[in-house]
């Protein structure tokens, strides 16, 4: 069986094919089809079901191109996976809506269904927990939402914090005060803000106190009103720290708590405050819990396979203990 898919224009055809036809090479390998190009069209040949799936993937790729987005290997593999699951319609839904715009005018959009649900949850809830492995965009999308809320005058300031799990013995040998010592841990937050605001505007907002980036210990005793507050790497917060943080919530504020429960650095015997909070707060009104998975990893495709391998090993260890 074969299917004839016309992209309608040479530039669109080129974008769908990829550099040296790499997109089509991946598609052919994953679905077991062959392809050829006729004018501005792609012709797929193979078994009926494989060709049908290939046609749906091509439609999604063309929609991606027409939306002004690029097709990389990670996105292509995700598109193929969703199509196999009968969820091809979800792909176009992901592309609609811009989360934020960088200082260079580049729109930031969700790349997976999980990311779309996460962003929607942040928009619709007062407190949102974003739990998932590295590379799922938990922190970056939260910062994007914070910047969008500030620019939209929904909040008056942005507060970003992380637990300084090594603020004891190891950091004690470093020069400077606690803020200086924990700066390396906060670097991903600085970088995201500088990209979204532009470096000079970001610096000015920091100087004015509109943007505050501080270790979690600095939150004690405060009421955070009219602010968008993000607690990053929350798996390293203790139960007591998590309760302290969540009860800082003031009028007109939003909170986003992000973390990866598989990468806890707390001392042995200490329960992760993130794990505890997700368990007891799930289902509470105005609180959302979003669990991202390896399917939402938007870094190199190998990262997804690494995450799956570690999750498989964790399941094996749990099985050995029972």
Image (cartoon, rainbow, N blue to C red):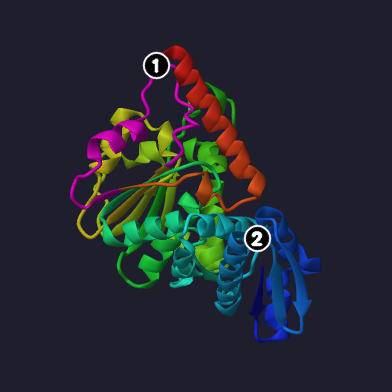
The residue shown at (55%, 25%) is: 313
User: Looking at the picture, how far across and down is residue 71, in whole percent?
Assistant: 64, 66
Quarter containing the N terminus: bottom right
Where residue 8 sits, quadrant-wise, is bottom right
Residue picked out by circle 2: 47
In the picture shown, does residue 117 fall above or below 6?
above
Kind of element beneath mark 1: loop
Which residue has dot 1 on it? 269
Residue 37 marker: none
Q: Residue visible at 71% across and 75% down?
A: 42
How crowded is the residue under tag 1: few (<14 C-alpha within 10 Å), some, or many (20+)? few
Percent of width and height locating residue 41: 70, 80
* Secondary structure under the numbered disc 2 in the rendered image: loop
| Quadrant of the frame with the C terminus | top left
Residue sitting at x 55%, y 70%: 60
The alpha-carbon separation of the residues under discs 2 and 1 comes to 55 Å
Look at the image and say whether residue 8 sits in the magenta stretch: no
Which residue occupies the foreground of this view, 31 or 111?
31
Could you tell which of marks 2 and 1 lies nearer the N-terminus?
2
Helix, strand or loop: magenta stretch: loop
């Amino acid at each position: 069986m074969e299917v004839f898919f016309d992209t309608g224009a040479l530039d669109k055809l080129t974008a769908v094919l990829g550099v040296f036809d790499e997109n089509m090479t991946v598609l052919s390998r994953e679905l077991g089809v062959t392809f050829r190009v006729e004018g501005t069209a792609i012709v797929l040949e193979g078994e009926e079901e494989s060709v049908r799936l290939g046609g749906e993937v091509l439609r999604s790729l063309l929609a991606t191109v027409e939306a002004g987005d690029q097709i990389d290997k990670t996105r292509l593999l995700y598109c193929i996976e969703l199509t196999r699951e009968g969820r091809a319609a979800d792909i176009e839904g992901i592309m609609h809506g811009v989360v934020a715009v960088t200082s260079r005018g580049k729109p930031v959009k969700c790349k997976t269904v999980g990311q779309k649900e996460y962003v929607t949850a942040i928009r619709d809830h007062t407190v949102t927990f974003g739990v998932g492995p590295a590379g799922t965009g938990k922190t970056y999308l939260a910062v994007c939402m914070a910047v969008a809320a500030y620019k939209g005058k929904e909040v008056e300031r942005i507060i970003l914090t992380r637990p300084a799990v090594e603020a004891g013995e190891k950091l004690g040998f470093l020069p400077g005060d606690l803020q200086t010592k924990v700066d390396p841990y906060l670097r991903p937050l600085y970088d995201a803000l500088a990209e979204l605001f532009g470096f000079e505007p970001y610096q000015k907002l920091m100087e004015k106190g509109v943007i505050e980036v501080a270790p979690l210990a600095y939150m004690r005793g405060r009421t955070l009103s009219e602010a968008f507050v993000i607690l990053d790497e929350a798996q390293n917060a203790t139960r007591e720290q998590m309760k302290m943080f969540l009860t800082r919530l003031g009028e007109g504020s939003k909170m986003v708590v992000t973390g990866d429960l598989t990468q806890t650095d707390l001392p042995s015997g200490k329960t992760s405050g993130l794990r505890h909070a997700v368990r007891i707060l799930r289902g509470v009104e105005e609180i959302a819990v979003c669990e991202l998975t390896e399917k939402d990893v938007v870094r190199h495709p190998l990262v997804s396979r690494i995450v799956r391998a570690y999750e498989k090993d964790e399941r094996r260890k749990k099985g050995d203990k029972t």
